[in-house]
Amino acid sequence: MSKPEIGVYLPQMGFTYEQILHRTRRCEQLGIDSVWLYDHLYGPGVPDYPSLEAWTLATALLAHTERIDVGHMVLCNQFRHPAVLAKMVTTLDHISAGRLQLGIGSGSIEDEHNRAGLDWGTFRDRSERLGETLEILHQAFANEVIDFAGRHFTVRDMPIKPGPTRRPRPPIVVGGVGEKYTLPLVARYADVWNVPTYALGELEHKTSVLRSICEEVGRDPSTIVLSVEAVMALAPDDASLASVRELAEKRFGLPAFGLEEGGLVGTPPAIVDRLQQLRELGFDQIVLFTHDRGSDETLDLLAGEVIAKL
């Protein structure tokens, strides 16, 4: 069984650019596969915290690294017109020599939309917009032109040149587990399906639902990479496990983070065992929050005592 892709999620709330660049370069030096950012106009629930803009930050990180992939968990579809986004993606794909992963979702924070004067709408509205964006992106990447008329977006004979350097396209990562709207979009459009932390207790059920929807639409489910994001509280030894768990519970104790359901609290052997379980469930991409937000010590331990043992 091959090693899963291991990524580190670095939500940029409270980080300076220098701090997040250091962590990204450290991940690259250690052979970690990818780094992921969030896409919010401010830190959710903490608008007074500094928070760098997601696309600009990803561009800078990719320009100052050489091998590591960078993506977003996930871009908010409401923030960027899909034709403009297609142009942004292909441009950054060329700048990075094919190291962009395109995570995208329907939007998750109503308050930031209200503050910015952006239309929120119903979940159905947002899902429809996301579906139209995904169709537009597929056209742009496959044909280098967009010609689309939908309920929410109309784009006429719009060239997207150059097309992507990564073929057939930068991986499109769609996050979410909603069975009515999100999973049908995954089945039709996604290269990668990401299960958020709040659904870690439903992995087998949601995977089964996705397979059923794929059968309905004629998609081979094996062509979709299964991805999961989870909080990892990695302790170097048993003596430090209690303090590591305490910090993880302080930062990620809300039920939506799925700390217990994820099962990634422990010393390296326990973490290796759990990652192998996730791999056996079919998850080829695992994106990890770390309990201490990507310290050098934890990244070194992750690379040397966990990833090296997979």
Image: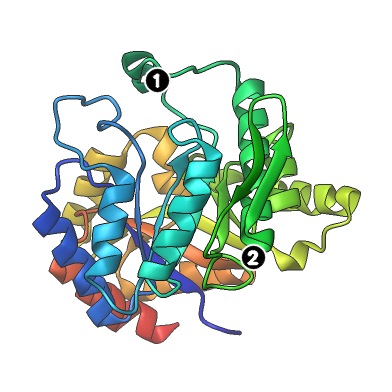
> Circle 1 sits in a helix, a strand or a loop, which is it?
helix
x 59%, y 65%: residue: 169
Q: Earlier in the sequence, mark 2 or mark 1?
A: 1
Q: Is residue 125 left or right of residue 35?
A: right
- Residue highlighted by disc 2: 281
x 45%, y 45%: residue: 74
Instruction: Give the total number of marks visible in the rendering.
Output: 2
x 38%, y 79%: residue: 307
Vertical relation: 193 (above or below) 51: below
Q: Quadrant of residue 123?
A: top right
Identified by mark 1, the residue type is His
User: Around disc 1, counting alpha carbons within 10 Å, would you say few (fewer than 14), some (14 to 19), or many (20 or more)?
Assistant: some
Residue 245 got which mark? none
Identified by mark 2, the residue type is Leu
> Circle 2 sits in a helix, a strand or a loop, which is it?
loop
The percent position of residue 144, horizontal first and vertical second, equals 63, 59
- Residue highlighted by disc 1: 113
Vertical relation: 310 (above or below) 26: below
User: Which corner quadrant holds the C terminus?
Assistant: bottom left
User: Around disc 2, counting alpha carbons within 10 Å, would you say few (fewer than 14), some (14 to 19), or many (20 or more)?
Assistant: few
Q: Is residue 101 left or right of residue 269?
A: right
Return the residue nearer the eye: 201 or 10. 10
Q: Is residue 229 left or right of residue 132?
A: left
Let me know if residue 4 appears in the view: yes
